[in-house]
Image (cartoon, helix red, strand yellow):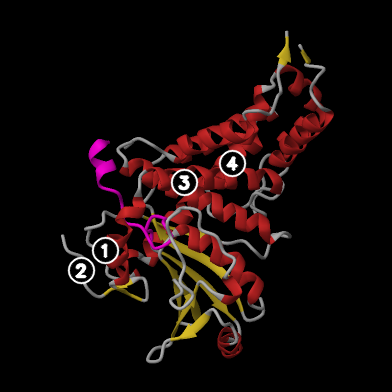
């Protein structure tokens, strides 16, 4: 533990842990999207590539990063928050931290017409890096589509089995216990090296709920990665959730009188 | 057993809403949990509250866990936006406290150098020194 504290993990300019994450957008009208992107002042095209830089200025000037109190912004050299690239009729937004991804999704959701592009999934790593650690050589090295899909479908399959058990339960309390045991067991598992999160924006009436869900999903994992870095090797999502739920709802004030 | 009379009606209503929504199959928007369980709980809500107040916290934990372990958000109906915001805020506070406490600021220059060596923020062109 002490050794780890003496050797902090790799961070980005704004203070969060360096954890590469890639947002993938489905495209309907890529030409219109390029026009829309180039109208944004916070987006700048790279001269020699089919990619754009996303800078912390203008339209996204009011984004906040509280994780670093000593950072001072210089308007002449705005921080590059991420990059955008086109490939295989998809738009990829590459970001170096989970928090930036959490900010990027609602930001671009508001700016981009859903008829042009909509966010489909996010691929990311469940680890933090040492300052002198070899970094993965691009997203192709980090993310294997087949493996990410396999993990996703396995989870969905497991969930459907739990759903059937709930349906067959004799009582509501039994159904809840089945569901609760499943969720607690899932949250207690060691997280995979890389994961995929699929957005369900189309089925949600309120996109803010999706964005909050994404935030909890990612930042819970960020907390787990950091705690493990600090030597709490058995720390899991279940621990993170227990602590968070207790902190938030512990004061619910419901007691029973005998 | 009876409820503490000081409990606000609003809290009971919120808890009832959570329980009903959790078992109503709204989770995920695509999958349904326990239609039978839903019918049961709708008719037995009062007695369940009377006999097991811990159930409410268990519901909340389960809702957040489902949020955290599954493949998409799916929180609509399980746990309302206000409660989701509180969970998200708490995570942000916990993480920011860690970042500020461990003093990552002073190591940021080294970290930045490594990240800046990456083309387009994600494709390293040079390996950081070991």
Res. A128 in view: no
Q: Which residues are magenta?
A: A1-19
Query: Looking at the picture, do discs 3 and 1 lie on one chain?
Result: no
Tag 2 secondary structure: loop
Residue placed under numbered mark 1 in the picture: A135
- The tally of labels here is 4
Chain bearing mark 1: A
Residue at 44%, 48% (x, y): give it.
A221
Mark toward the start of the polypeptide (4 vs 3): 4
Q: CA distance from mark 2 to mark 3?
A: 28 Å
Q: Earlier in the sequence, mark 2 or mark 4?
A: 4
Location of residue A114 by image quarter: bottom right
Give the labeled residue for mark 2: B127
Q: Would you place residue B8 above or below residue B125 in this image?
A: above
Residue B117: percent from left, percent from top: 28, 72
Q: Chain of mark 3?
A: B
Mark 1 to mark 4: distance in Å? 32 Å
Q: Nearer the viewer, residue A209 or B59?
A: A209
Mark 4 highlights which residue? B64
Q: What element does badge 3 sit on?
A: helix
Residue indicated by mark 3? B95
Mark in the foreground, 2 or 3: 3
**Subunit that carries the residue with mark 4:** B
Viewer-closest of A192 and B12 = B12
User: Is the same chain shared between marks 4 and 3?
Assistant: yes
Question: Is residue B30 toward the left or the right of residue A238 in the image?
Answer: right
Q: Quadrant of residue A234?
A: top left
């Amino acid at each position: 533990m002490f050794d780890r504290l003496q050797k902090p993990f790799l961070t980005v300019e704004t203070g969060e842990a360096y954890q590469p994450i890639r947002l993938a957008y489905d495209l309907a009208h890529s030409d219109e999207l390029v026009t829309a992107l180039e109208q944004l002042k916070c987006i700048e095209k790279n001269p020699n590539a089919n990619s754009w830089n996303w800078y912390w200025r203008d339209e996204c000037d009011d984004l906040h990063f509280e994780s670093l109190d000593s950072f001072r912004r210089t308007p002449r050299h705005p921080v590059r928050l991420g990059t955008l690239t086109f490939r295989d009729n998809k738009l990829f937004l590459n970001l170096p931290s989970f928090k930036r991804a959490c900010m990027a999704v609602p930001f671009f959701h508001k700016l981009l017409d859903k008829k042009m592009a909509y966010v489909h999934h996010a691929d990311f790593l469940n680890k933090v890096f040492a300052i002198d650690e070899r970094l993965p050589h691009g997203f192709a090295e980090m993310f294997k589509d087949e493996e990410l899909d396999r993990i996703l479908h396995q989870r969905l399959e497991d969930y459907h089995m739990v759903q059937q058990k709930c349906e067959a339960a004799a009582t509501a309390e039994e159904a809840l216990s089945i569901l609760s045991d499943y969720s607690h067991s899932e949250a207690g598992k060691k997280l995979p090296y890389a994961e995929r999160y699929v957005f369900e924006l189309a089925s949600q009436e309120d996109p803010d709920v999706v964005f909050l869900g994404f935030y909890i999903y990612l930042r819970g994992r960020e907390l787990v990665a950091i705690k493990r870095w600090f030597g709490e090797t058995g720390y899991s999502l279940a621990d993170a959730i227990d602590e968070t739920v207790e902190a938030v709802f512990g004061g619910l004030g419901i007691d029973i009188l005998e | 057993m009876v409820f503490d009379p000081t409990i606000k009606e609003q809290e009971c209503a919120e808890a009832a809403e959570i329980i009903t929504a959790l078992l109503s199959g709204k989770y995920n928007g695509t999958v349904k949990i326990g239609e039978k369980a839903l019918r049961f709980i709708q008719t037995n809500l009062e007695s369940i509250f009377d006999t097991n107040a811990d159930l409410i916290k268990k519901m909340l934990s389960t809702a957040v866990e489902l949020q955290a372990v599954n493949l998409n958000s799916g929180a609509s109906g399980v746990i309302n936006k206000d409660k989701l915001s509180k969970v998200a805020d708490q995570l942000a506070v916990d993480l920011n406290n860690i970042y500020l406490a461990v003093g990552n600021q002073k190591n940021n220059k080294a970290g930045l150098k490594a990240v800046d060596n990456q083309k387009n923020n994600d494709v390293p062109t040079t390996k950081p020194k070991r």
